[in-house]
Image (spheres, grey):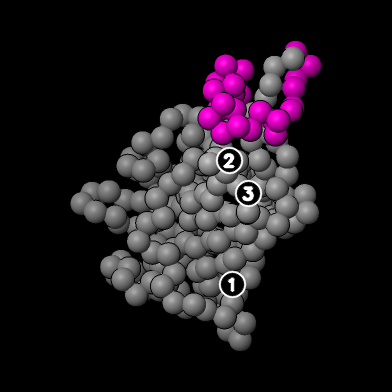
Amino acid sequence: MKIISRRKLIQLSLLGGIASALGSRSSFGKVLALMPTPNETEGPFYPAKDQNEKDADLTQIEGHRGVAQGQHIIVSGQVQDIAGHPVANAVLDIWQADANGRYRHPRDPNPAKPDTNFQGWAIIDSDENGFFRFKTVIPGAYPASGTWIRPPHIHLKISKPGYRALTTQMYFPDEKHNKTDLLLNAKSAAEKSAMIAKNIGQQGNLPIYEYNIVLDLLRK
Ligand SMILES: [Fe+2]
């Protein structure tokens, strides 16, 4: 996580009148603050139509015999504020393409066949310690425009009263299309590193990706 200098922090505090909310100090007396997770565009494929099932397992839909195609994975992490405090009961609104790179959206022009066993959308809460977890698939890359291929990514909107609402995208490590993505490569190295999840091991045969989220304070 990026450490913001004391001077920068004072500037931020003056801007937002938040000095009293930021108290964490290292043993060297520096005030520590985490970089808020970078914003990213919502994109054109936020679900257009409501659906019954938006639970934390996107790989299965109730009543379907089959499960979603592709590599099933766990994504887990913690929502924190910029002072490093856990943010409990934050709402995470999550949507993504299926393993073929196709969204459950009527205006997705991708000719790839939709996976009807993939839930595509979830709305979950962080727990009392800010932790969250969901099961999904690694989304497929898909054509955006011209020669631009979007790398696998998961869209998220995270909200909690008192915090600045965040819309962002989570990426996967070691994906070849990360190198040429126009959105990801508009970010700084520190921002990219915050937006790319880390593969931290396996649960049974499911790879686990850690993705932590830092919410900024609401500035008036
Ligand atoms: Fe997308």
Quadrant in the rendering for residue 60: bottom right
The correct choice, above or below, for 141 with respect to 46 in the image is above
User: Judging from the image, what secondary structure is the residue with disc 3 in?
Assistant: loop
Q: Is residue 155 visible?
A: yes
Q: Quadrant of residue 63?
A: bottom right
Q: Which residues are magenta?
A: 1-28
Amino acid at dot 2: Asp
Q: Please, is residue 24 above or below residue 192 in the view?
A: above
Amino acid type, label 1: Lys
Q: Earlier in the sequence, mark 2 or mark 1?
A: 1
The residue identified by callout 2 is 216
Q: Nearer the viewer, residue 97 or 23?
A: 23
Where does label 3 land, which residue? 162
Crowdedness near tag 3: few (<14), some (14–19) or many (≥20) residues, C-alpha within 10 Å: few
Could you tell me which residue is drawn at 70 percent across and 17 percent down?
30
Image position of 44 with respect to 28: above or below: below
User: Is 85 located above or below residue 15 in the figure?
Assistant: below
